[in-house]
Amino acid sequence: MQNIINLLTRAIFMSTPLILGALGEVIAERTGMMMCAVEGIFLTGAWAGFAGCYLSGNMAVGFLAALICGMLVAMLYGFCTIYLTQHQIVMGTAVAILMTGFCTFFYRVVFGIPTSPLKIETLPVLKIPGLCRIPVIGQVLFSQNIITYITWLIVPVVFYVIYKTAAGLTIRSCGENPEAVEVAGINVRRIRFLAVMVGGCFGGVAGAYYSLCNVGMYNSEIISGRGWIAFGICFLGNWNPVGALLFGILFGISEAVGIYIKAVGGSGIPSELFSALPYMLVIVLTALRKQFNVPAKLGATYVKED
C-alpha cells in the first residue's frame, strides 16, 4: 500500500510542471497562437532558474529569473510570428533550437566546465497542517511543494478568466473570429502578444521546476521533450484548463510509473522503454482521440485589413 501512495505522491509531483506549461499553452492557443516554442521556453526556464538560484542562493530569485527569461523567449517568438507574420510552427521550432544552443553556451560562460555537476538544494516539501494527516490523500495531495499548491490554485483561476470574464471572451474570440474582435475596436495582435507572454511566464516557471524542485542541477538534457508533452496535453485537454489538469495528472502518473519501474529493476525490459512511456502515451492518446475542439484560427497568421 505504501508503494502505491509513494507512486501517487510522485505522480502529483511530476505532473505539476506539465499542468503549468499546459495552462500557459491553453491561454496562448485560445487566442490562435500555436506556441511551438514551448520546449525552448521550458529549457530556458530550467537554465535561468538554476543560474539565478545558484548565484544568489535564493530559490525565489531562481523562479523569478525563470519567469522573466521564459517571458523574453515568448516575446521573441511572439514578435516574429505576430508582428513579422512568420510561420508559427517553423518559428517555434527555430526558437526551441536556438534556446538549446543559448542555454549550453551561457551555462559555460557563467560556470565554465566544472569537473563535477553543480548542485543546489531542491525546493522542500511543505506539509499542510492537519490535511497532511488524512490517510492516503494527505500524503498524496497535501505533502507537496509550494509550486504544486500554486499550480492547483491557478487552474480554477484560469478557467474562470477564460470562460467567465470579458477578458476571457476576448481571448477566445481572437482564436475564433479575430476580424470581429478587430471590428469591435480591440487590437488582436496586442491580445495575442500578451497571451503569448503569459504562456512564456508559465512555461519558464515550469522549466525551472525540473532544475529547482526535481534534480537540483542543470544539464542540456533536463527537459528532454517535456515541453512537447505539455503542448500535447493542451491538445488532449481540448484547450480547457480542467482538461489540462486531468491529462497533466495522467502523464504525471505515466512518468512516475516509468521512474518507479526503472528504480526497482529486474523486469527484464530495457529501462529506455519506461523512459519513453509519457511520449508513447501522447502518440497513442492523440491517435485514439476522435474529435478536437480546435480554435478556428489556431496557427493562422492574422493581418489587419486596411
Image (cartoon, grey):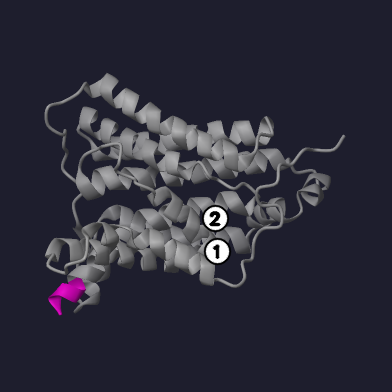
- Tell me residue 51's x, y (percent): 27, 31
Answer yes or no: do the residues labelled 2 and 1 have beta carbons within 8 Å?
A: yes
- Look at mark 1 in the image and give the residue it sits on: 240
Name the chief secondary structure element in magenta.
helix
Secondary-structure class at tag 2? helix
Question: In this rendering, is residue 258 above or below 212?
Answer: below
Question: In this rendering, is residue 129 above or below 59?
Answer: below
Quadrant (top left, top right, bottom left, bottom right) of the C terminus: top right
Question: Is residue 304 visible from the viewing direction of this image?
Answer: yes
Q: CA distance from mark 2 to mark 1?
A: 7 Å
Question: Is residue 133 visible from the viewing direction of this image?
Answer: no
Front-most of residues 5 and 128: 5
Residue 165 on the magenta span: no
- Tell me residue 168's x, y (percent): 63, 56
Q: Residue at x 30, y 41 (%)?
A: 221
Secondary-structure class at tag 1? loop
Residue type at mark 1 is Asn
Number of numbered labels in the structure image: 2
Q: Residue at x 46, y 67 (%)?
A: 284
Q: Residue at x 29, y 39 (%)?
A: 60
Q: Quadrant of residue 125?
A: bottom left
Residue type at mark 2 is Val
- Look at mark 2 in the image and give the residue it sits on: 26
Q: Is residue 145 left or right of residue 1?
A: right
Quadrant (top left, top right, bottom left, bottom right) of the N terminus: bottom left
Front-most of residues 76 and 161: 76
- Tell me residue 206's x, y (percent): 37, 48
Label located before the other in sequence (2 or 1): 2
Q: Which residues are magenta?
A: 1-5
